[in-house]
Image (spheres, helix red, strand yellow):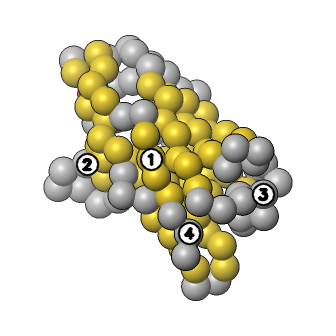
């Protein structure tokens, strides 16, 4: 069993920044894929960004140039640096870890609210 715990969410004004953290209960060195997702009220969950075990990253078009995903294998933490936040970024952000073909783990999420 793998546990993921997100932190760093909160209330911020538009244009501000937040850094989300996802602490993992085991070594992330060999975890194939780790990602950040978000879900706003009344909307489907969407992929924000992900990072492979080799450090290759992907970001959704809506956050490209503003959000950066990174991983610290020594601390078993994955980060999401969010800059130039917009009201439409308001959502519950959760992280995931894909360990195998049928083994994806999720955290419970952290709320991000951006005021205009």
Q: Which mark is residue 2?
A: 4
Is residue 20 in view from this perspective?
Answer: yes
Going from N to C along the chain, the mark reached first, 1 or 2, is: 1
Identified at 25% across, 48% down, the residue is 40
Which part of the image, by quadrant, shows the N terminus? bottom right
What is the C-alpha distance between the residues marked 1 and 3?
A: 18 Å
Q: Are marks 2 and 4 in contact (CB under 8 Å)?
A: no
> Mark 2 or mark 4, which has the lower sequence index?
4
- Residue nearer the viewer, 108 or 82: 108
Disc 4 to disc 1, C-alpha distance: 13 Å
3 or 4: tag closer to the N-terminus: 4
Residue 102 in the image: state x and y as whole percent: 58, 85
Q: Earlier in the sequence, mark 2 or mark 3?
A: 3
Quadrant housing the C terminus: top left
| Residue 29: numbered disc | 3
* Crowdedness near tag 3: few (<14), some (14–19) or many (≥20) residues, C-alpha within 10 Å: some
Residue topped by disc 2: 40
- Where disc 4 sits, the SS reads loop
Residue drawn at 60 percent across, 34 percent down: 68
Task: Answer above or below: position of 62 versus 96.
Answer: above
Query: Mark 1 — residue?
Result: 6
Disc 1 and disc 2: Cα gap in Å? Answer: 17 Å
When asked about the image quadrant of residue 69, the answer is top right
Residue 84: image location, x then y, percent: 44, 19
Residue for point 64% across, 83% down? 101
Q: Marks 3 and 1: in contact by CB < 8 Å?
A: no
């Amino acid at each position: 069993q793998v546990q993921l715990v997100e932190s760093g969410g909160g209330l911020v004004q538009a244009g501000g920044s937040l850094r989300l953290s996802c602490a993992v209960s085991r070594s992330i060195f060999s975890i194939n894929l780790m990602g950040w997702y978000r879900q706003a009220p009344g909307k489907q969950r969407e992929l924000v960004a992900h990072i492979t075990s080799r450090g290759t990253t992907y970001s959704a078009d809506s956050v490209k140039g503003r959000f950066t995903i990174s991983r610290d294998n020594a601390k078993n933490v994955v980060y999401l640096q969010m800059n130039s936040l917009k009201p439409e970024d308001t959502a519950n952000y959760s992280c995931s870890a894909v360990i195998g073909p049928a083994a994806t783990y999720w955290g419970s999420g952290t709320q991000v609210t951006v005021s205009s």
